[in-house]
Amino acid sequence: MFRYFIPTERERQMSKCFEDVGRNDLFPFIESRLNVLWDTIFQMIKRLTTACIWLPYLATSLLPFVVDGLVRRKISQTNFDYPSPMAHRYSIYAMLGALYLFLMGLTLPFPVPPQSMPIGIFIVAWAMNTLLANTQKRV
């Protein structure tokens, strides 16, 4: 990528009358922007691998919440209770919000605290519990 945007010294010598165009202002700026781009991609990959490390914990914490939500749904079905559409919808919004924050957190220009992943996992698990507990009776 650097060779595509920034000419080498040999390419500068081959271009007659344009040897010094952009040498001091344009090409150093392009090089700095490319360095920022690749540093951001490296940071995204690093944060994504850290998130993948937390995935087994998501599975182990999600299972009790899912079972509890399904049991609460069955209890409300037998008692003829009405599920709350508002709680159902806001739990979907909470899961989408957690996903949005996770994806935006990959590119944040400042350090993300390591406690954010367990907190996000808990928010998703709690929202899944509420979603399953307030699912309509006939799905």
Image (cartoon, rainbow, N blue to C red):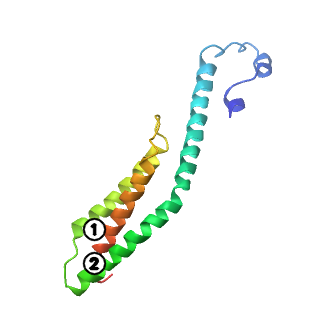
Spot the residue most to the bottom.
Answer: 78
Which three-letter amino acid code belongs to the residue tagged 2? Gln
Which quadrant holds residue 85? bottom left
CB-based contact (under 8 Å), mark 1 and mark 2: yes
Where residue 88 is drawn, which disc sits there?
1
When the figure is inspected, residue 88 is found, relative to residue 70, above or below; the finding is: above
* Residue 55: x %, y % from top left: 52, 59
* Residue 138: x %, y % from top left: 30, 84
Q: Can residue 100 be seen in this view?
A: yes
Left or right of 31? Residue 88 is left
Which residue does the image show at 72% across and 30% down from the upper left? 3
* Residue 79: x %, y % from top left: 20, 85
* Residue 47: x %, y % from top left: 53, 45
How many residues crowd around disc 2 within 10 Å: few (fewer than 14), some, or many (20 or more)?
some
Which residue does the image show at 55% across and 49% down from the upper left? 50
Asked which secondary structure carries label 2, the reply is: loop
Where residue 136 is drawn, which disc sits there?
2
Left or right of 63? Residue 38 is right
Which residue does the image show at 36% across and 66% down from the upper left? 128
Q: In terms of sequence position, does the residue under pointer 1 or pointer 2 come before the other?
A: 1
